[in-house]
Amino acid sequence: MKQRLPGVGSVYFVVLLSVLSSIAHRGSKVAVSLSALELGANSFTVGILAALYSVFPLLLAVYAGRISDRLGVRAPILLGSIGITLGLLLPALHAGLVVLILCPALIGLGHIFFHVSIHNAVGSIGAAADRARNFSTFALGAAVATFIGPSLAGFSIDTNGFRATFAVLAAVSMLVVVLALVFRATLLPRRNTEREPAGQRALDLLREAPLRRTLIMSGVTLTGIELFSFYMPVYGQSIGLSATQIGLVLSSYAAAAFVVRLLMQDLARRFGETGVLTGSLFVAAATYALFPFLSGTAMLVATAFLLGLGLGSAQPLTIMLTYHHAPPGRSGEALGMRLTVNKVTQIAIPLVFGGIGSVFGLAPVFWANAAFLLAGGVLSVRTSGSAAAGAPATGVSGGANATGVSDNAQAPRS
């Protein structure tokens, strides 16, 4: 039997760790991009820095998932947080483009071990019937962190400068290390006591059609989320916004994500998870197409809020569906595979769009991403249409969880 984290209190402790780590991670993206621009970097260099966050996650995501499955979540969460803290301390101690290159690389290395294990921990708490509520709570915490992180970084940059901002973010990440050590008994040392069958490969996970579709949709939605985090600061600076105003625009997205995640279970019950994902892609495509025509802070805040309504529920839904569709005993590995797919797009897209921005300006960056999201929405419509005949009813009523599968269907995963 797979061990599970005990008690409702464990959910809130895990969410607290995630919120603190995400504040540091999200804030670092604003600080890194604006610091690079301050040092004279162009949009292509910012794209390289964005891609560096994803290099180690691309290479190690599946391995991190296996570690989480075999050894438990405690050690990866602790060591990953230490890596994030070290990455943030470097630019706090010394300014320069070389240090800025090391910063996102180290943060990405620590984040991948933390990220996979924290998702695995959330999925392991309680019974299958509790999973939708647990992931909804986790998603709300992530929205709070996405709101605080950019605002904290922007305000700190305007008030104290870049080096002090990196120090503040490092202190937030260090708090995760302290909490994980002080309350280490809350995190089980091991999650899975079963031996993994011999001969299994990570690529075998892609043979599962529902899991494969979820991974594709995850990559598309995460592209929209990540490019907004990096190119909104670049665009904001190009039209004369201050760091505080840029942080406000980014935080508006997070506020909308919080609102839509409050309604996530009701939306999934009414439209189905794939339906919500499809709608989010179309809304995000339309929003991205609007950005280059806007210059005032109020309009950008409103448009970012609309984008948050579109993409806010997409990330937690893909996490929940990935955990659900994973084979027994391989949830961490499947979550790692999800991140691998995400990182392929997150490395390629910033480099491609950074090159577009350097040659043609920033407007084509937004329009190209709008086209990418639109294509993902069309693919999602075709996929959901072909799978609809055999799909189970979606909802959380009548003994079904938010993935649309009854609790009885989850029995092999316990």
Image: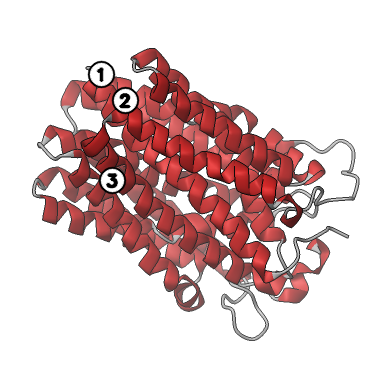
The quadrant where residue 92 appears? top left
Nearer the observer: mark 1 or 3; the answer is 1
Along the viewing direction, whichever of 196 and 206 lies nearer the viewer:
196
Q: Residues within 10 Å of mark 3 (few under 14, many from 20)?
A: many
Query: Mark 2 is on which residue type?
Result: Val
Q: Position of residue 158 (x, y in %)?
A: 21, 37
Which of 362 and 166 lies nearest the eye of the viewer? 166
Q: Residue at position x 64%, y 30% from top?
A: 60
Q: Secondary structure at mark 1?
A: loop
Position of 276 relative to 297 (above/below): below
Amino acid tagged 3: Ala
In-front residue for pair 49/313: 49
* Element on which disc 2 rests: helix
Total labels: the figure holds: 3
Residue type, label 1: Ala
Sequence-wise, which precedes: disc 1 or disc 2?
1
Q: Residue at coordinates 72% horizontally, 57% vertically from top-left?
A: 186
Residue 365 visible, this orientation: no
Q: Residues within 10 Å of mark 1 (few under 14, many from 20)?
A: some
The reply, left or right, for residue 256 in relation to residue 409 is left
Q: Quadrant of the N terminus?
A: bottom right
The circle drawn on residue 370 is: 3
User: Which badge, 2 or 3, is on the more N-terminal residue?
Assistant: 2
Callouts 1 and 2 close, C-beta under 8 Å = yes
The percent position of residue 230, horizontal first and vertical second, equals 32, 36
Q: Which mark is residue 46?
A: 2
Choose mark 2 or mark 3, whichever is in front. Answer: 2
- Could you tell me residue 271's position as x and y percent? 45, 74
Query: Which residue in the structure is indicated by mark 1?
Result: 41
- Residue drawn at x 80%, y 48% as measured from the top left: 189
